[in-house]
């Protein structure tokens, strides 16, 4: 089990632990994307599948999201990279595989490029070109006045837009990742184009696998949840063995 987790600002990181093997120190940490949280159906399904396969799993909601402390308008990639460091602090002694979806994928790339405590990395429809994403999805929305995808519970902050623009892209972090890395992306993703994954694997090291799910959308909905889970669980279990 994992005890209470707080980030460097004292904000609580809400989490749920799935016991897979009480004798193992292997742990999969699952991070969500923008406007998401640890309770997204495909994240819960993936955690359950890991537990059923004998692998411990931890779902987290970054600060400002879900039931975690903090404000949604403060949630940025850079802040979540720091949050993930706090999660790793709380998971000292565990062999950690980090799995990040969408913006959580960008968080994972940046953290894994500088933190050797991440032993395995998985990017699910991972965001790579952050500035392009900001303009493509929210370029017509006024920061600190409008909302993400017209969701009033998800106000668009200037801090968020400035951070994505400042980062620009996580391509340069790819060569710094020295651990095994799996990327999974659907061809019908209309939020983060599959080209993002195609571009970053060119910059990655030799121990990288890229799986394309023909027809899948951004959240691996419907018939694509099962093949995504099968791909990820199989790859991680083989690497943890």
Image: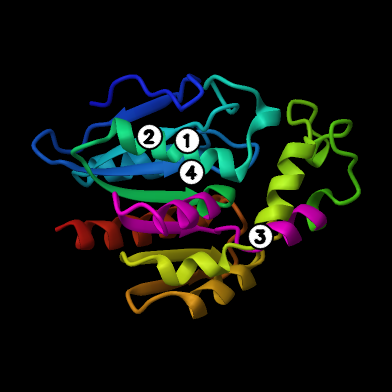
**Percent x, y for residue 35?**
65, 37
Of the residues under marks 3 and 4, which one precedes in the sequence?
4
Position of the C terminus, as image quadrant, is bottom left
Q: Marks 2 and 4, Cα distance to the nearest angstrom? A: 21 Å
Pair 1/4: label in front: 1
Badge 1 crowding class, 10 Å Cα cut-off, few under 14, some 14 to 19, many 20 or more, is many
> Which type of secondary structure does the marked residue at label 4 adopt?
helix
**Percent x, y for residue 202?**
51, 80
Q: In the rendered view, would you say 114 is above or below 42?
A: below
Residue in the picture at 54% in, 72% down: 200
Q: Residue 42 got which mark? A: 4
**Percent x, y for residue 114?**
40, 55
Of the residues under marks 2 and 4, which one precedes in the sequence?
4
Q: Residue 39 got which mark? A: none
Q: In the rendered view, would you say 139 is above or below 89?
A: below
Label 2: which residue?
A: 87
Position of the N terminus, as image quadrant, is top left
Label 1: which residue?
A: 83
């Amino acid at each position: 089990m994992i005890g209470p987790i707080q980030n460097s600002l004292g904000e609580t990181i809400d989490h749920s632990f799935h016991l897979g093997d009480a004798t193992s120190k292997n742990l999969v940490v699952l991070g969500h994307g923008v406007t998401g949280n640890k309770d997204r159906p495909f994240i819960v399904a993936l955690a359950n599948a890991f537990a059923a396969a004998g692998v411990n799993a931890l779902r987290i909601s970054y600060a400002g999201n879900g039931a975690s402390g903090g404000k949604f308008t403060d949630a940025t990639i850079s802040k979540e990279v720091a949050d993930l460091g706090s999660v790793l602090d709380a998971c000292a002694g565990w062999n950690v595989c980090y799995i990040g979806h969408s913006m959580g994928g960008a968080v994972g790339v940046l953290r894994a490029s500088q933190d050797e405590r991440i032993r395995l990395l998985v990017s699910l429809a991972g965001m790579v070109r952050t500035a392009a994403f900001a303009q493509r999805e929210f370029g017509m929305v006024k920061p600190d006045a409008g909302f993400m995808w017209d969701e009033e519970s998800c106000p668009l902050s200037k801090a968020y837009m400035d951070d994505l623009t400042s980062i620009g892209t996580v391509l340069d972090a790819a060569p710094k990742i020295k651990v095994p890395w799996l990327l999974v992306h659907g061809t019908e993703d209309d939020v983060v184009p599959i080209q993002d994954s195609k571009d970053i694997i060119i910059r990655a090291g030799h121990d990288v696998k890229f799986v394309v799910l023909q027809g899948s959308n951004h959240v691996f909905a419907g018939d694509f949840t099962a093949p995504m889970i099968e791909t990820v669980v199989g790859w991680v279990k083989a690497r943890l063995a």
